[in-house]
Image: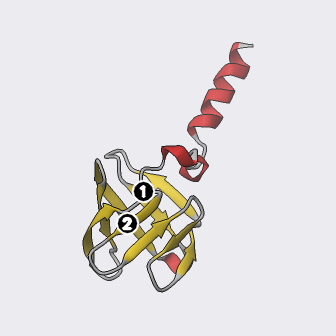
Amino acid sequence: MILRSLLAAALLAMAPASALASEELPFLGTWDCEVATFTFTPTTYDNGSEEMPIEEVQEGSDGSYTLLFADDYFITLSGFTGDTMGWFSPASGDNFSCTRTD
């Protein structure tokens, strides 16, 4: 019984961040990010001109979230305070301050 409990706890600890319940994801919704309105659902990211399927969500130890997409593209969302967050793309170097609109 104890071994089974330990095994279950270990498996939960190894669960991918994409298994996080959607209500725990602070970036879900629509955001004004200076250059465009970005919309996040549990499975997609719309940057105002393209909707991209989210392949994985990784939660950082600092409270940030990295969203991984096809072709090794990813963005990091961080600094969640009330209805604001930061948006960063290492690929372009763009960094935006976002305000929730919904």
- How far apart are the two marked residues, 2 and 1, measured between alpha carbons? 9 Å
Q: Are marks 2 and 1 in contact (CB under 8 Å)?
A: yes
Residue 58, how many percent across, how many down?
48, 55
Residue at the image position 49 percent from the left and 44 percent from the top: 24
Report whether 88 appears left or right of 49: left
Mark 2 residue crowding within 10 angstroms, few (<14) / some (14–19) / many (20+)? many
Total numbered badges shown on the rendered structure: 2
Callout in the foreground (2, 1): 2
Q: Residue furthest top?
A: 1
Q: Which mark is residue 46?
A: none
- Give the residue type that dot 1 points to: Phe
- Residue 71 location in percent, x, y? 54, 81
Q: Residue furthest front?
A: 102
Badge 1 element = loop
Callout 1 crowding tier (Cα within 10 Å): few <14, some 14–19, many ≥20 = many
Element assignment for label 2: strand
Position of the C terminus, as image quadrant, is bottom left
Residue appearing at x 31%, y 72% in the figure: 33
The picture quadrant where one finds residue 93 is: bottom left
Q: Nearer the viewer, residue 6 or 41?
A: 41
Question: Measured along the vertical axis of the image, is residue 47 above or below residue 86?
Answer: below
At a point 47% along the width and 69% down the height, the residue shown is 39
Residue at 47 percent across and 49 percent down: it is 25
- Rendered image: mark on residue 27: 1
Q: Which residue carries the number 2 mark?
A: 31
Give the image location of residue 16, x and y in percent: 58, 49
Q: Position of residue 10 (x, y in %)?
A: 61, 32
Q: Mark 2 belongs to which amino acid?
A: Trp
Query: 52 left or right of 83?
Result: right
